[in-house]
Amino acid sequence: MLPGPARKLLGRGKRAVAESGKTLAANVDRKRREAALPPNPKAPDSDIRLFVGPANFAGQGTTWARAAEKHLEGVKARNMQYAGGAYRFPADLEVERELLDDRVWQDRQVEYLTGGSYTHVLIEAGRPVFGTRFARNAVGDVKTLKEAGVNVGLVAHGSDVRLPSRHAETHEWSPFHERDDFFVRLEAQAKREGTLFNTFDGPTFVSTPDLLVDVPGAKWLPVVIEPERWANDQPVMERERPIVLHAPTNPRFKGTEYVEAAMQPLHDRGLIEYRRLTDIPSEEMPAAMAAADIVLEQFVLGPYSVTACEAMAAGRVVVVNVDEGVRKHVQSVTGRELPIVPADPTTIGAVVEQLVADREAARAVAVRGPEYVRAVHDGTMSSAVLGTWLKPAAS
């Protein structure tokens, strides 16, 4: 039998070998898992390298990235979205949700965004670009990126910062008057993200002007669409029964119950043909829009959305309950009057009847839509807003 000191030394040696074996096995497993991860897009080769993500709501992360590349010299961009959303849009990087909790993917993502590949990161909706590495919002991501010398900006899309309690106080038809579980969840989210946005010491943006109430220090970053994708030569307001289209992505946020209550009687009378579209693939929407005469967008929140921009680009008559503050902000920033017919839940039916009765006036509004979209929502104005931030570090 070995002496006591020798036995201890041998024991330590065995443990060291065992630990070394475990470390080696862990490293091999990690490399295997890294190799199995979907590849990241190659980072741009340019002076300003922008990364946008991870929400891509209505495809806006993608269109903002492409607009910056198109209109800003020396800027190239990539964007990211989580996989599995209700409406799928193109993106440079789509990350499966199960990877968001994966430490190997998180480590690689941190290295990808902080290792010099990107100079600027625009974080959407307060959602983390590093998955759940730090938290379920972007506070830790912001800190990590800034410590690595990356220039960070934040952009809000809507429910991420729109405070339901405030909205209910100021909007008669707000969808937040009922204090249900939905209200409680969104209230907590808006308070959390509102704190992030309103205490952030970098640039903040909002996709619609109504959100400036919730993020007063932000700049309006207009949503971007491709006008040529929606352009068509279909006449408007020439059918005996005009086609009235409503395509709600979220019926509660669009006031669909008020739309249906107002349109069904007009449809039954034979005055219009009412069509409600749900879950239609995005590639089919241009044809559906071109086939309509009047597009009813939203009547309870206050902004005008991507759908309204698409309908204006298509030369349709667009009816939306737009806040007066939004109209004034648009006019002051763009010098243009918003070519959208106003209506609220109590007047939708009467407004549509008037449009059918006075088709000349209806066509006069519709014809102004494509020009407005080309001036405000084709990416030129949005890239100019981003250009105030996307500058070399030396400047």
Image: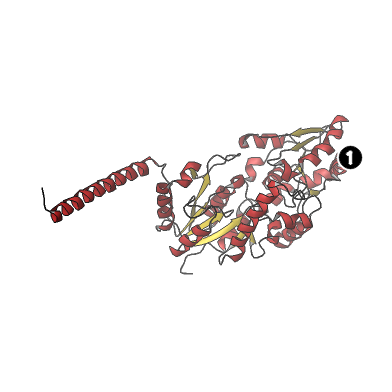
Residue for point 55% across, 60% down: 153
| Between 190 and 304, the one nearer to me in the picture | 190
| Between 207 and 31, the one nearer to me in the picture | 31
Q: Residue furthest bottom?
A: 395
Element on which disc 1 rests: helix
Asked where in the image residue 291 lies, by quadrant, the reply is: top right
Res 323 seen here? no
| Between 369 and 193, the one nearer to me in the picture | 193
Mark 1: amino acid: Ala
Res 290 seen here? yes
Asked if 228 appears above or below 148 in the picture, the reply is above
Say which residue label 1 marks. Answer: 357
Asked where in the image residue 170 lies, by quadrant, the reply is: bottom right
- In x, y percent, where is residue 62? 55, 48
Residue for point 61% across, 58% down: 192
375 on left or right of 37: right
| Between 168 and 117, the one nearer to me in the picture | 168
- In x, y percent, where is residue 100? 48, 46
- In x, y percent, where is residue 83? 53, 41
267 on left or right of 231: right
Q: Residues within 10 Å of mark 1 (few under 14, many from 20)?
A: few
